[in-house]
Image (cartoon, rainbow, N blue to C red):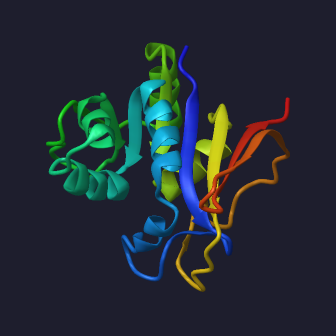
C-alpha cells in the first residue's frame, strides 16, 4: 500500500503562494543543492504525483519544458489530477480522477506501492486532511515573510494533533518538518 505524502514550501507567515497566483519566486531564496538533493530523494521514493487541477496546470506548463534531474522525474513519474472540469491531461503519463476525491485517493493508495506525493494543491490537501488520508505532511518552512498570499490548507479544518517525525534544518535557513497524525 502506498503512503500519501503532502509536500510544500511555506513562508514563515504561513503562505504557500504569494499575493498573486503562481507567485513562487520566493522559492529561489532557499533552492540550493541541499534542497535539490532532498527533492530528488523524495522523487525517487515516489510511485505517483497527485495534484488538484490548478496546481496540475501550473506544474505541467512549467515542467513539460524543463530539463535536469528534477524535471526528468517530474515528467516521467505517473501523475493523477483530481478534477471534474479538466477535459484533457496532456502532461506525460497523467490520468484524471473524476469521482469522489476520498474514494479515488483511497483506491490509489491501494494500487500504488510507493509514495504518492501531493505538491501544492491547497484545496485538495484540505479535502484529504479532512478525510484523514495523509500518512505524512512534509512542510518546508522558509525564512521568508510574504505579508499576503494563499494559505496552504485554508481555514476550515477540524483540529488535529500531529506527531513530529523529523525537523531538519538546511544551510539556506529552510526547515523541513515531517509530521504524521497521532493515532
The answer to whether residue 131 is visible is: no
**Residue 178: image x %, image y %?**
70, 42
**Residue 48: image x %, image y %?**
39, 28
Quadrant of the image occupied by residue 146:
bottom right
Q: Nearer the viewer, residue 157 or 151?
A: 151
Q: Nearer the viewer, residue 154 or 168?
A: 168
In-image side of 57 versus 36 (left or right):
left
The answer to whether residue 15 is visible is: yes
**Residue 27: image x %, image y %?**
47, 65
- Quarter in which the C terminus is drawn: top right
Q: Please, is residue 141 above or below residue 179 in the view?
A: below
Residue at (24% x, 37% y) in the render:
75
Quadrant of the image occupied by residue 156:
bottom right
Q: Nearer the viewer, residue 95 or 16?
A: 16
Q: Nearer the viewer, residue 55 or 175?
A: 175
**Residue 86: image x %, image y %?**
23, 50
Residue at (17% x, 47% y) in the render:
64
- Quarter in which the N terminus is drawn: top right
Tally of marks:
0
Q: Please, is residue 176 above or below residue 155 in the view?
A: above
Amino acid at each position: 500500500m502506498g503512503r500519501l505524502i503532502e509536500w510544500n514550501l511555506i513562508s514563515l507567515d504561513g503562505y504557500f503562494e504569494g499575493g498573486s497566483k503562481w507567485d513562487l519566486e520566493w522559492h529561489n531564496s532557499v533552492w540550493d543543492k541541499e534542497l535539490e538533493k532532498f527533492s530528488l530523494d523524495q522523487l525517487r521514493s515516489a510511485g505517483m504525483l497527485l495534484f488538484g487541477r490548478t496546481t496540475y496546470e501550473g506544474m505541467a506548463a512549467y515542467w513539460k519544458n524543463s530539463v535536469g534531474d528534477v524535471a526528468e522525474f517530474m515528467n516521467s513519474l505517473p501523475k493523477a489530477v483530481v478534477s471534474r472540469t479538466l477535459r484533457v491531461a496532456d502532461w506525460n503519463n497523467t490520468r484524471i480522477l473524476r469521482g469522489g476525491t476520498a474514494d479515488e485517493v483511497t483506491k490509489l493508495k491501494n494500487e500504488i506501492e510507493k509514495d504518492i506525493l501531493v505538491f501544492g494543491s491547497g484545496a485538495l490537501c484540505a479535502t484529504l486532511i479532512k478525510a484523514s488520508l495523509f500518512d505524512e505532511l512534509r512542510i518546508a518552512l522558509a525564512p521568508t515573510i510574504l505579508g499576503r498570499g494563499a494559505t496552504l490548507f485554508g481555514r476550515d479544518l477540524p483540529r488535529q494533533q500531529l506527531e513530529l517525525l523529523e525537523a531538519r534544518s538546511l544551510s539556506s535557513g529552510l526547515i523541513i518538518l515531517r509530521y504524521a497524525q497521532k493515532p
